[in-house]
Amino acid sequence: MPKTNTLIKICGLTSEEQALQVAKLGANAIGIISVEESPRYISAEKKKKIFKTLESFYPKIERVSVVQNCSIDLIINNFLGNPSETIIQLHGDEDIDYCKKLRKKIPNIGIWKAFRIKTEKDLETINYFEDFVDAILLDSWNKETYGGSGKKIKSIYLKNLKFTKPWWLAGGISIGWVNEILTDIKPDGVDISSSIETSPGIKDIAKTAEIINRLN
């Protein structure tokens, strides 16, 4: 398989040790879940510690804080002083007005917006957000959870997608899907979580290394 430039985000980490291991494997971004309902949630204090450690040892890696339907003031408060993240990922039902307001509040931090795709029609409204975010993330729809379900979007919805901003594919990214992702879907990046876990928030480092190597 030819080498690609597909970016790799490993999401839902919960410890400094695993964050450093994943960064060493060559991930481009590491995500931490700031959604209290998630089994992968960690506190703002622990998040900051992990991100500051990453910043010291791997300053080029994107440090992504995942939030869901969170008040903008709470996002700012969770910085605990200077922000340690480089990206805020909106993984809820945030609308365009929310994105505009957040952009004004944090002009120097990237904003990624996730969209849960149940049918092809769900893709139609995404373009309206493109002027107000830095990247788009497509995740599978699940009535039980907003993310981390391990379910895939139907591949037929993902062919020939065109956005003006980079787009990431999430939802059930696994070794068995890599060939199709690289040859037919061709996202700018992939967001991997549950398929490489031994339990929520704990990654199997051997599986993580394998999928990163396959994507590279």
Image (cartoon, rainbow, N blue to C red):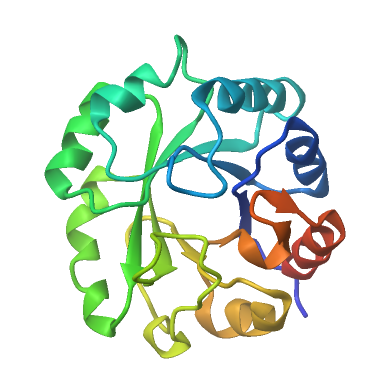
Q: Measuring 22% from the left and 48% from the top, which residue is drawn there? A: 94
Pick the front one: 65 or 201: 201
User: In what quadrant of the picture does the N terminus appear?
Assistant: bottom right
How far across and down, in percent of the image, does residue 87 sit? 46, 36
Q: Along the horizontal axis of the image, is 130 left or right of 187?
A: left
Quadrant where the C terminus sits is bottom right
The residue located at (55%, 49%) in the rendering is 39
Residue 106 seen in this snapshot: no
Q: Residue at x 32, y 59 (%)?
A: 164
Evaluate whether residue 2 shows in this view.
yes
Residue 61 at x, y percent in the picture: 64, 37
Image-based side of 31 in relation to 132, left or right: right
Vertical comparison of 184 with 82: above or below:
below
x, y percent for residue 120: 28, 83
Instruction: Determine the image quadrant of residue 210.
Output: bottom right
Q: Residue furthest top?
A: 81
Q: Observer-nearest residue: 180 or 150?
A: 150
User: Which of the 4 image quadrants contains residue 180?
Assistant: bottom right
**For residue 3, above or below residue 43:** below
